[in-house]
Image (cartoon, rainbow, N blue to C red):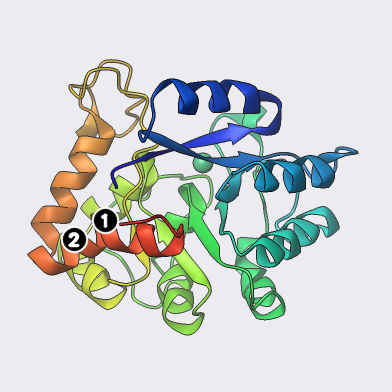
Amino acid sequence: MAKAVLLTHLKDQDRAKEQIARHPGRFTWFVAADPSVPGAIAGLTQALKDGAIGIGEMKNHTAADAKGMRRVYDLAADHKVPVLIHFQEASPFAAEGTWNSGYRHFDQILKAHKKTTFIGHANFFWASISADVPANLEYPSGPVKLGGLTDRWLADFPNLYGDLSANSGNNALTRDPSFARAFLARHQNKLMFGSDCSCKDGRGTGSGALLPSLKGKCVGRETLARLQEFSSPDVFKKLAWSNAHRVLRLPV
Ligand SMILES: [Zn+2]
């Protein structure tokens, strides 16, 4: 079934439920909250009982291994739902700060929470396909140096997946096409297309494109085109369809 996932903050859950009811069969939802806020875990728990099929995206100014985050990972395991995390270590927009920091040590979490299904995305997760990650550069360009954390951990940990959405996912595919072809083939069961694109018309209006190569274009559409270009038809089907259905437990 072709459904869009509404990445919903706990406080907006009524809006998500309203849209799901208004457009039958079109949407499903994830729920997110800052676990350091009192009542967040109880709220997330209730939302999962109310039909949310995942937790995320988690995007808070906390460490990825903070105590509250670890409670979220346990909650996801208990409810057999994935948790989507925005990893961002540094930003040229100083006011933004970091989000779920400490990705360099995230293998400890992957080991400690084996029953939790993690989906990584965003700047630092995707910059880390390369062994060299420049400081203060969100979208590194040029050839990927083999041995990056994300590339290794996708191979080493069965509970880590990757969401190729947004400028960061697109950049990971386009900075080094020959790497991208091998990377998609290597992790063909672990990667999935997400749009995370605010484009209103599929032609780039309001798409939030940040990369020069994406200016005036729909980020989601461009990323789908690259996935198609860099993979075989059967792998493309996994990336754009079946992996997400399996991980999100959506009926096909
Ligand atoms: Zn994000």
Q: Bin the neighbour count of mark 2 within 10 Å (Cα to Cα): few under 14, some 14-19, many 20 and up.
A: some
Depth check: give the residue in front, 235 or 215. Answer: 235
* Residue 87 in view: no
Q: Pointer 2: what residue?
A: 237
Q: Bin the neighbour count of mark 1 within 10 Å (Cα to Cα): few under 14, some 14-19, many 20 and up.
A: some
Q: Secondary structure at mark 2?
A: helix
Depth check: give the residue in front, 156 or 80. Answer: 80
Location of the C terminus (image quadrant):
bottom left
Left or right of 93 in this view: 194 = left
Depth check: give the residue in front, 80 or 130. Answer: 80
Work out whether 59 lies above or below 178: above
Q: Pointer 1: what residue?
A: 241
Depth check: give the residue in front, 211 or 156. Answer: 156
The kind of residue on which mark 1 rests is Trp
Residue at (40% x, 73% y) in the render:
151
Mark 2 sits near ligand 1, with its Cβ under 8 Å away = no
Mark 1 sits near ligand 1, with its Cβ under 8 Å away = no
Mark 1 vs 2: CB contact within 8 A: yes
